Image (cartoon, grey):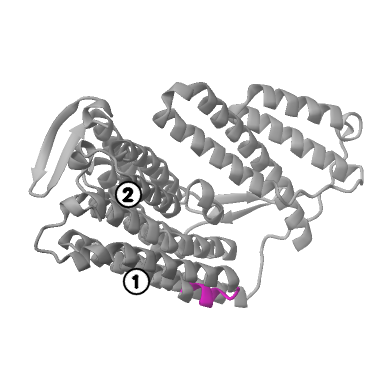
Amino acid sequence: MLIENLGGNLMGTIPLGDIVLYLNSLHIFLFVTILVFTALIAISRTETQVEAMFGSLDENKVSVGKKEFKQRRFLAIICGIATAGAMITGDLFNFTLFMALIGIVNIGIVSAVKHVDVLNSAYQYGLIAMMCGLPLFGGAAMILAATGTLSLFELAAIPASPMMIFGALVMLIGVCGESGIAPFFASKAEMFRTPGSPFILIIHLSSLFIIVRFVEILLIIL
Amino acid sequence: MVASIVPQLVPAFYSLMYTTVLYGGLIVAFIGLIGIAMEKRDIQVLILTDIVGLAMLIIVAAVGTDLSEALILPGLVVELAEIMAISEILISHEMRKKDVHTSFTPIPLNIDMEIMTTAPNFIALLLIGYGVFLSGFTGGAVAGGGIVIYVLSRKVRGLPVVVLDGVGAISGISWCLWIIGFLFFFILPQYWLLSLFLAALGLLLKVASKIGLIGIMMREEYGRK
């Protein structure tokens, strides 16, 4: 499909040698939104999680230590920047790398938690993310093998061959697994019970943005 | 690999190898996945996952251009970083498991409200019906509330609660429905009504079963004492 038909009018290209970035209204909107969220997360403090106890009026407060807080804030900012990069990139290669980075950082955000349940779920999610490295990179490599390029600008001009469609679908599986959406979400769901809310939110936010962007990429390739 | 994009100076033998290597990589990955499915110990699963990562390197390396080499390097780094992160998680998980202490000790719940004994089934049915009529997120919340009232009322009246262990699975499948509806919206816009209903019903089931899960979690808290 033509790039001009998707995501509003083309505002211009930024040719950086082999890598050609292109800007349109959808990308700029997604990019700015995720950066605003990252800025909000950077200046915010963690919440103190209050668990109500069953059958009594007592409550159980779970707060986050300063060291853990700093580490988690750093990783959350990295995750936000990686998501922003995946939003604006005009290259399937960069998208793949940003996606892999988001996968690692998501594990890192919850890895320092003290709950066994959360650690268990982070472990399962990590295994899924590692296994889905295969379809993610493999799909990108199949598209590269079928077309000889990974630039979305050039992929848009090439008519889709069965190999490209297969590569794109394999890559869809990879993106789903790395960001932990629908079929793989069960591994990730428990991770949100971690105290330290604003940093946990970026895990969810990045997967939502990534799926929107990847649908666009899928449409460009097919 | 498409023959037209391969330069002339590459021997035909190498370009024909691509399909073989691709299948080889997929078979290696499949063997690794079978191993993961059969193994139960965490550490073994982690080691077997690395086989899948190696299969990824094979598939990427099969292309054999400079761009694929550029993909191999981060791929390798990502695999290493992930295996280190996951083993770190595994270590801290095992260490937490050793000293067992839970500060979260719930006492059994005692709800003696009239609403729980008079007509709870009717109220639950009404809520679920209204939730299905609403559909979407709100409907899911209302229907889930109905399920919770039903479960609570049975608990209060001392009747056995039918435990639905598959509720989590329903939630997962309905989320898949939602994602499929979302994809259809973009890819096949002429079927917008179908995708709208897929999304709405998926979300309804998902939210309803999520709230239903609270009931199961409460049961687990009882069990812990």
Whole-percent x and y of residue B149? 79, 36
Secondary structure beneath label 1? helix
Which numbered dot is residue B80?
1
Residue A1 lies within the magenta run? no
The answer to whether residue B170 shows anywhere in this view is: yes
The image shows residue B62, relative to residue A162, as above or below, that is below
Instruction: In the rendered view, tell whether residue A2 sits above or below residue B79.
Output: above
Which callout, 2 or 1, points to the residue nearer the camera?
2
Q: What is the x, y in percent for residue A21?
A: 16, 41
Which is nearer the eye, A160 or A107?
A: A160
Residue neighbourhood size for the residue with mark 1, other residues' Cα within 10 Å, grouped as few (<14), some (14–19), many (≥20): some
Q: Chain of mark 2?
A: A
- Looking at the rendered structure, the kind of residue marked 1 is Leu
Count the labels in the image.
2
State the SS at label 2. Answer: helix
- Give how far across and how far down residue B136 sits, in percent: 59, 28
The reply, left or right, for residue A131 in relation to residue A8 is right
Pointers 2 and 1 within a single chain:
no
**Residue A163: image tag:** 2
Looking at the picture, which amino acid does disc 2 mark? Met
* Residues rendered magenta in the picture: B40-46
Number of the label disc, if any, that sits on residue B215: none
Q: Quadrant of the C terminus of chain B?
A: bottom right
Q: Main secondary structure of the magenta part?
A: helix
Q: CA distance from mark 2 to mark 1?
A: 29 Å
Chain letter for mark 1: B
Q: Residue at x 21, y 46 (%)?
A: A91
Res A72 seen here: no
